[in-house]
Image (cartoon, helix red, strand yellow):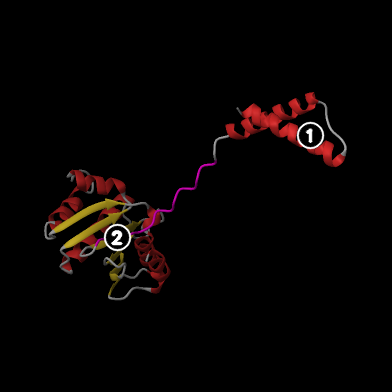
Amino acid sequence: MDIFFATAWSIWWNRNQVVHNDSGSPPSRSWEMANRMLNDFKEACSHPPLPLPSPIPKWRAPPSGFYKINVDGASTHDGTNSSIGVIICDNQGIPITASSKVLLSPYTAEISEALALLHGVLLAAEMKMSHAIFESDALSIVQALNQGDVGGEIGHILQDIRTISTSFSWCSFQHLKRDGNRVAHELAKAAKLSGISQTWKGVYPNCVKHLLLEDI
């Protein structure tokens, strides 16, 4: 069927050349043109489509009646102390509490992430939040908590998290990619740069204002 339409178009084009330009080609040229067009079309169709860019992971507000607590830990190899960041938002994406804290030692990345989650759980429990969703970009820690694995170097921290989490009517531990956890990451970075631990309730620092507005 494709060759039929290609040939018909070539004949039509050749006829127009005869009518309007007083020139034309022999039938063999029309056949060659039709085959060339068909081959070009098939070659174009044989190339796979370009992959669409992956959507950038975005933070999402929790359901009504829930609070979302995002946490992140920051560690370096330069011997400086690790730091953590926590942001708690309501179902409208409005920040309720933010925390930027310097830890006591230069912990490993895994310990820093676990301590960040512990700090988030403690803040939520202190504020008597009944329905809480905790998010971290540390996949191994989220998996360990959900599987009840409290062994290893951070086992005692994970056990503390699980114990405190029983104070909530409902809670979950979820993983998200770093791009969706930018506010907590920025808070952890701010503590490392300033060397100061701070907690804000009902307000938030200017360093995360643009990120919060983008998330909303």
Position of residue 130 relative to residue 44, above or below, is below
- Which of the 4 quarters of the picture holds residue 43? top right
Q: Which residue is mark 1?
A: 14
Q: Nearer the viewer, mark 2 or mark 1?
A: 1
Please tell me which residue is depicted at 19% across the width and 63% down the height of the picture. 122
Residue 192 pos. (x, y %): 37, 64
Task: Name the quadrant of the C terminus.
Answer: bottom left
The region drawn magenta spans: 50-63
Front residue of 60/123: it is 60
Q: Quadrant of residue 188?
A: bottom left
Check if mark 2's residue and mark 1's residue have beta carbons within 8 Å: no
Element under disc 2: strand
Is residue 144 inside the magenta stretch?
no
Q: Residue at point 64% right, 33% down?
A: 41
Q: Secondary structure at mark 1?
A: helix
Residue type at numbered disc 2: Asn
* Amino acid type indicated by mark 1: Asn
Image coordinates for residue 140, horizontal then vertical, percent = 28, 45
| Residue 158 visible in image | yes
Which residue was labeled with disc 2? 70
- Can you tell which mark lies on residue 202? none
Side of 181 relative to 147 (left or right): right
Q: Position of residue 7 (x, y in %)?
A: 70, 29
The structure residue drawn at horizontal position 20% and vertical position 60%, both measured from the top left corner, is 132
On the rendered structure, is 66 left or right of 92? Answer: left
Q: Is residue 169 left or right of residue 94?
A: left
- CA distance for labels 2 and 1: 69 Å
- In the picture, the quarter occupied by the N terminus is top right
Residue 80 or residue 200, whichever sits in front:
200
Tell me the quarter of the picture where residue 49 sits.
top right
